Amino acid sequence: EAGFLVGALSAVLSNFVMGQGPWTPFQMLAWGLIGLFAGIFAKPLKKSPLLLYIYGMLSGVAYSMLLDIWTTVWTYKEFTLREYAAAISTAVPLTCLYAVSNLLFLIVLRKPIGDKLSRIKKKYGL
């Protein structure tokens, strides 16, 4: 539950800087689901950096595919599997970018941010 809430609110709050739009609910859903599943699989993800890296890459793909629902509706004014497949195939370069950037950020930031979050968790008894 907390993972979904953190993900969904992250989309809304970041869009105050980046710009709100009709795509925001799709971002909220995507980030919320990514946060929800991260919470569900928290124990194995914490134990295995490799699983975390794989999850991060899959999250990038899932985010892109969920946002492509919005792209399809906006572009074609309706949703059909044919148009959705076209949107997904057009987005392949960005989808790859999401997956690879998530992987790189996790490789670089997993340990330092994880250590800081663990310290905060211990300090405040969370």
Image (tube, grey):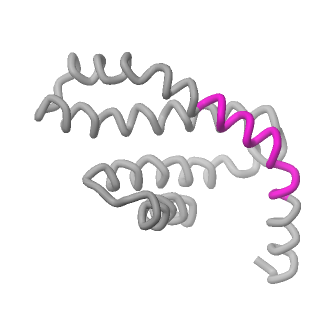
What's the residue at 87%, 55% (across, down)? 112
The quarter holding residue 69 reads top left
x then y, percent, for residue 10: 51, 62
x then y, percent, for residue 122: 86, 75
Q: Is residue 93 left or right of residue 111?
A: left
Q: Main secondary structure of the magenta part?
A: helix
> How many numbered tags mark residues here?
0
What's the residue at 37%, 16% (across, down)? 89
What's the residue at 81%, 58% (across, down)? 113
x then y, percent, for residue 75: 19, 32
Assess whether residue 86 is covered by the magenta stretch: no
> What is the span of residues highlighted in magenta in the rendered image?
99-114
Q: In this rendering, is residue 106 above or below 112? A: above
Q: Residue furthest bottom?
A: 124
Q: In this rendering, is residue 17 above or below 84? A: below
Question: In this orientation, which residue lies closer to the viewer: 75 or 85?
Answer: 75
Q: Is residue 56 left or right of residue 5?
A: right
The quarter holding residue 108 reads top right
